[in-house]
Image: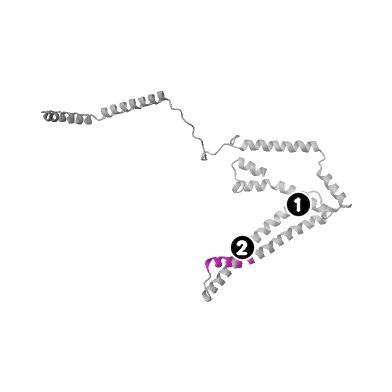
Amino acid sequence: MVIALLLLAGHVHPWEGIGLQALLVLSIPIDIWALGLCSRTVFLERLSVDPPKGSALRLWAQWAVFSIIYLPLLSMIVGGVKALAKSATEATLHYFEETFMVIPVAEKITIELVMWGIPATIVLIILLYGWLFGLGALAQRHVRASTPVSGSFQDIVYKWDLLRIPNDQPLTLVAFTGVGLVLVFLFWGLIPVSTPHPHEEYQFINVKNEEVMVEPKAVLKNAEQVLLRAEATIKELEKDNPESQKSEADKKSAEKPETKSSAQ
């Protein structure tokens, strides 16, 4: 989770592409540590044996190699069984519809899913059982190589509790705190901004509209400026179009005799 959070802070998605690869690679030491802790607990509590040092790394490597070989074969076999079951199902239903009756669409989909899903699921369960059996067979080698532990169950539990207590507790505390500080500084260094803020495209809801105070003097001043600009624009247009001025003057001169004749 910490690694995923750091990747997200660095604008790298941990569920796809390079982010997923980095997450898987960085989680390998954690997997080895967790496997060593769990295997030693099971060996001591259930089998009363103490595994040798480095068994977690060797067991993880063996399981990884076995899974890399077995799981692709499992996927190929299940895919082949699924394709074969689908083709057999389609042929069977086609023959049934041509011979007896037409099956409605909804019922046909359900029948197809059941007919090819059951054999594919059975094969998948068998292969998963084989995968788990193989992992158990590899773990049995480490059990045989472990040393038996004598004593009662309480003695074994007490020994396991002592193993979990570090020899140098102050050093462990300092190392744990230092790792935490480094992770915190990495997080704040990778994150783009230190203060959370909404995205630019975020649309706010129920935003209160602020009332703008109207100042009469400012409004009159802006209106005067707009009128002055309009007057200056009209003068420039008149300078650029002298023909329009002549036509307007001719119209005015033509209108004057008409007004005189009407007055007479």
Query: In the image shown, does 249 or 145 lie closer to the viewer?
Result: 249
Outermost residue, right side: 151
Q: Please state if 212 lies on the left or on the right of 87 as rendered.
A: left
Q: How many marks?
A: 2
Q: Position of residue 27 (x, y in %)?
A: 68, 47
Task: Tell me which segment is drawn in magenta.
Answer: 104-118
Hey, what amino acid is under mark 1? Arg
Residue designated by label 2: 79
Mark 2: few, some, or many residues within 10 Å (few <14, many ≥20)? some
Mark 1: few, some, or many residues within 10 Å (few <14, many ≥20)? some
- Residue 24 in the image: above or below residue 95: above
Residue 116 is a magenta residue: yes
Q: Which mark is residue 58?
A: 1
Helix, strand or loop at mark 1:
helix
Q: Position of residue 228 (x, y in %)?
A: 33, 25
Outermost residue, left side: 264
- Residue 140 in the image: above or below residue 199: below
Which picture quadrant has residue 241? top left
Q: Nearer the viewer, mark 1 or mark 2?
A: 2
Hey, what amino acid is under mark 2? Gly
- Please give the name of the residue rendered at 62% of the width and 37% of the height, measured from the top-left corner: 190
For marks 1 and 2, give the CA distance.
32 Å
Q: Which mark is residue 116?
A: none
Proximity of marks 1 and 2: CB atoms separated by less than 8 Å: no
